[in-house]
Amino acid sequence: MAANTAHWFPDDPVFIRLLAASARYPESEAIVHEKDGREKTYPELLSDIVHTRDLLREQLSGFDQQGILRDHQVYIAVVSCSVYEFIIAFFAVRAIGGISVILPSGIRPDEASLMLKVRPACILAGSGSSDTAAAICSIIKNENKSHDLFLIKISSGARPLGEAIQLKINYALKIDSKRPGAVLFTSGTSGPPKGVVLPRASFHFGGNPAEPGSATLGYKGVHWWTGCRKALEPMLSGKKLYHIGETASAQEILEALRTYHVTTVGFVPGVLHDMKEYILANPPVESWSSCFKGLSAIYCGGATFEQSKFQFWIELTGLPFYIVYGANELGGRAIGGVSDKEGLIGRAVSDTIVKLSEEDHGEILAKSPRMLLGYFGDDELTKAAFDNEGYYKTGDLAELRDGQYWFRGRASSDYIRFRQLRISILAVESSLMKLPYISEACVLAVPHREARQLCGAVVRFQKGSFTEPGALTALARIRADLAGSLAPFMLPTVLTVLREGQQLPRTHSDKIMKRNVLRDCLGVTEWFSAETMAPGVEFWGSDLPQVDEAGAKLWDRGGMQASS
């Protein structure tokens, strides 16, 4: 690179914060630490961003005189096994006004072809993903001979820029923050993953510069919101990033918390559950509290949390428990707050307007400058996602009490339709988790030809804590123990118990894949039948309650009038 030159970045809060953070941070100290031992400094990161940006400018067309893409809809797919290479690619694409389409690192080429509904201009590939990227290019070319798709390798070993080469902000060069910035994909628990198109404003993140010595822990894929934020935000605040891989176990996360001086980390309920189980299996329990001494709070997002788990983590760490409600479509957090009660998710964050469809209850509707612009290549789905005032329809239910929101489940998938009645999955799961002999529970709707759906449960017993009294089976014991807290129609009628070492299938974002649970744990692919039950499955088939004897209230009928 020529000496005595300057590289200009657009007037963008992201690049202003990136350059400011790099100026504060010690040049020789690594800012990124990866599981494979790779460590990278800010000078190396910035040089790789510039090199990758320049590669894009050399091989793509349609730039204005300042090196920004004229077309606001230029998609550039990104696939990499390395979080460092992802960071480089994201900032390089952003610097030219492009849109990063962030693919899962372990994606199969045929899956990528289906997800890329709008064909990208090129694919940026990490060092360990070149073969995958080449296969994706080949499939797309075969499908559309006129589409000249090619791959560009992400620069990840450029020498740091010399002192004579300056990185500056061009304050005359602005890119609209409402312009599309990236595409992240949903978890796919309720169908094929949807591409969520987010504006550039989604990635401003905000916040103050990190205190010296601050560090965060990453352990999730960057193709969903939390993993993406945990990779990018530390670069803007000057916070050291330790990334221990997308498949890190509870033990590996705990060891990383103990080894590194981690000051911020985000959890999801599944990870906290697994860590709790590991801690309980490796006493003394109190010895594990040292892992959390650098944190100011336990941050948890992604779902509601059982009361017993609140108590465990608050007692172990002595820290407040902060619940975060958000989604890819919301550009991150929309509601949050300190909570020690099941279902309490807090208040709307400062830049987000939240309302409920029925004023003090109903579907959560949200609007913010960070929320999705639409779904990738799907105009009909985009139109259906918003109400007539432009609020995103989350599909989640909540109540508003004393200025705070209480989560009440999904409008569709968190209810079981048993005959004409409606069973709250959250209520059944919560009751199961209160039983002293159950450590994990998944409740789901089991398709049934006569009753429409049955209440199915997959549970894990605490080691050595469950004994069958007399002739009672596991299902009979559980139904007897729940009879005092649930109406008869809400009691599980299909049950299986997880074997030791058997895990519930989950997505990268730690959401349970209930369709897979139905198939793998209950043996149901279409309709449940007592005649073809899988081994180990119990069915309470002799006494399914009718509507009139089920102990249901009027509202359990889901708003439907009883027939006359």
Image: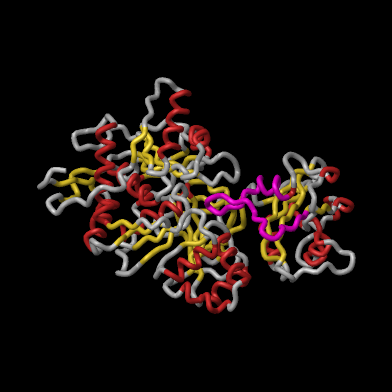
Task: Name the side, left or right, on which 185 lies relative to 439.
Answer: left
Q: Work out which residue is located at the far top of the displayed protein and give it.
A: 145
Task: Name the side, left or right, on which 74 lies relative to 388.
Answer: left
**How many numbered badges does the structure rendering display?**
0
Residue 63: image quadrant is top left
Identify the residue at image location x=50%, y=67%.
254
**538 or 493: nearer the eye?**
538
**In the image, residue 362 above or below residue 289:** above
Colour scheme: secondary structure
Answer whether residue 230 is visible to the viewer in this image: no
Residue 100: x %, y % from top left? 38, 41
Q: Work out which residue is located at the far left of the displayed protein and give it.
A: 4
**437 or 423: nearer the eye?**
437
Is residue 12 inside the magenta stretch? Answer: no
Residue 319: x %, y % from top left? 49, 74
**387 or 60: nearer the eye?**
60
The quarter of the picture where the N terminus appears is top left
Residue 406: image quadrant is bottom right
Identify the residue at image location x=58%, y=71%.
279
Identify the residue at image location x=29%, y=64%.
209
Residue 449: x %, y % from top left? 80, 40
Residue 388: x %, y % from top left? 49, 41
Answer whether residue 546 is visible to the viewer in this image: yes
Identify the residue at image location x=70%, y=47%.
520
The quarter of the picture where the C terminus appears is top right
Task: Name the side, left or right, on which 548 lies relative to 167.
Answer: right
Give the magenta-colored segment's residue range. 495-521
**288 or 418: nearer the eye?**
288
Task: Name the side, left or right, on which 545 lies relative to 92.
Answer: right
